[in-house]
Image (spheres, rainbow, N blue to C red):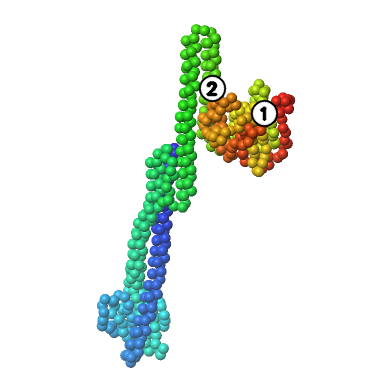
Amino acid sequence: MNARPWSLSRRLLVALGAATLLTWCVSSIWLYRTALDQSDLLFDAALDQTAHAVLAVVRNEASELTDSNGGVGFELAPIDRAHLDEIVYQVRGPNGGVAYRSPGAPILPLAVAVTRGFSSAHINGQDFRVFTLAADDGTATIHVAQPLARRNALAHSGAVRLLAPGAVLMVMLGFAVVWSVRSTIRPVVRYANVLDERAADAELPVSAIELPAELQPVARAIDGLLARVHEALIRERTLTADAAHELRTPLAALRLQAQVARRSTRYAERAAALDELLDGTDRAARMVDSVLTLARYDACRSGDLEQARVDLSMLANLVAREFQPLTSQQGTDLALAVDGTVVIGDEDALAIALRNLVSNALRYARKEIRIEVEASSGCALLAVRDDGTGFAPEVAERAFDRFFRGPDKSGVSSGTGLGLALVRRIADLHRGSVRIVPGIHGGAGVEMRFPLVPDHGALGSAVLRLGETSSAIS
């Protein structure tokens, strides 16, 4: 079962929303508790101030305070009945009796006469917060109280009113988070839509200016991938079109020779036509084989090839042995000038490249071909040189083009025209390079350069001439 892909916008919304909600909850609890604590301090300060104000007034009535020996005291007339349940007070005389009490104050004393400062009282089923203040001369004692129920209600109401703006800001912040996330994701969605609508053969990179900096490496990687895909499509189309064009001529020649052999009544003529037919079939087979080989390496990347240590000197010896019968038949001297140079790569691919270079040299060489392997300037060099006529400037410019065939030493254009193109592709896959270099006695040469293995070691060097003796490489 395939895992459901996760949504970046959903994760951002959930993460930011949860963080915002958690922050609001913590800050609201902290603000609520702080509001309650501050309310208690303010209410206590109000009790203190009221007690001092009442004490300042009752000092002028000290004569009446001495007459209060007990009883319920005199209840003052209310001035403002809107706050009867908020703060009440009692005034006691020097003998401890209640002389005055505010409207709504209980008849029973709010605190013991000797109590000073803040205390609590439970009278007639109601809880009070009480502050007691006494005159320095003992003539009066003031009890100022506030019902705890009313006090708590006012504190909670004030705290809730403080939280209301926070709730509104929370809602506004939620909308801001949603808008921010969607605005951030919108360029990514537009970029994806552009990629989806892009044609396979489009060459220009996709504009990623709107993408954030964190996604710029992804955009560059996608551009690189698109460039490689475009290049692969171009190579595929070019190879297909050129192969079809190049195969059309030999196939037409094959058909013509077949028709000649069919119509011929003489044995010699029929045999000659059949020989031409076989030669044409061989050329077409070589063409198809070269096309398939080049197509296979075109589809590869450097990481797709086998990565192993390859001793180029041993590889040169093996390829030289393969060509020994042909060079002996043509009277060409094939020499090796090699040392123990090691590279990392695919031995089969490097062997194909070297075979193509030697085969190409055989078409131009007069008497001598030399395969060279050496380490120079931190690179491994693999070169094949001949003593032929060399490359003309116009030929050298197009030597590595696909299906380009220059004239051989007899002046006839032969071959498939894919040999050097395949050599360049194999060099590219090995992060190497290939170029035309001077040959032997004014001839031509092709040199490949590869990254050198640092610890390749000195395996010795030798110059072998296969035309002189076969035992030298046996």
Q: Is residue 7 visible?
A: no
Nearer to us in this view, 312 or 467? 467
Is 126 placed above or below 142 here?
Answer: above
Nearer to us in this view, 209 or 135? 209
Q: What's the residue at 41%, 51% (across, down)?
A: 210
Q: Quadrant for residue 30, please give it.
A: bottom left
Q: Is residue 369 left or right of 244 when viewed as pictured?
A: right
Q: What's the residue at 48%, 39% (across, down)?
A: 228
Local secondary structure at mark 2: helix
Q: Quadrant for residue 433, please give it.
A: top right
Image coordinates of residue 406 in percent, x first then y, are 55, 29
Gap between marks 2 and 1 measured at Cα: 26 Å
**Within-10-Å neighbours for mark 1: few <14, some 14–19, many 20+:** many
Is 51 placed above or below 381 here?
Answer: below
Q: Is residue 247 left or right of 72 when viewed as pictured?
A: right
* Count of numbered badges drawn on the protein: 2
Q: Which mark is residue 336?
A: none
Q: Quadrant of the N terminus?
A: top left
**Within-10-Å neighbours for mark 2: few <14, some 14–19, many 20+:** some
Q: Which residue is mark 1?
A: 368
Q: Amino acid at mark 1?
A: Glu
Q: Are marks 2 and 1 in contact (CB under 8 Å)?
A: no
Image coordinates of residue 272 in percent, x first then y, are 54, 13
Q: Nearer the viewer, mark 2 or mark 1?
A: 1
Nearer to us in this view, 178 or 424? 424
Q: Quadrant of the C terminus?
A: top right
Image coordinates of residue 412 in percent, x first then y, are 55, 25
Q: What's the residue at 66%, 21% (across, down)?
A: 329
Nearer to us in this view, 297 or 88? 297
Q: Which residue is mark 2?
A: 283
Image coordinates of residue 111 in percent, x first then y, are 38, 79
Q: Amino acid at mark 2?
A: Arg
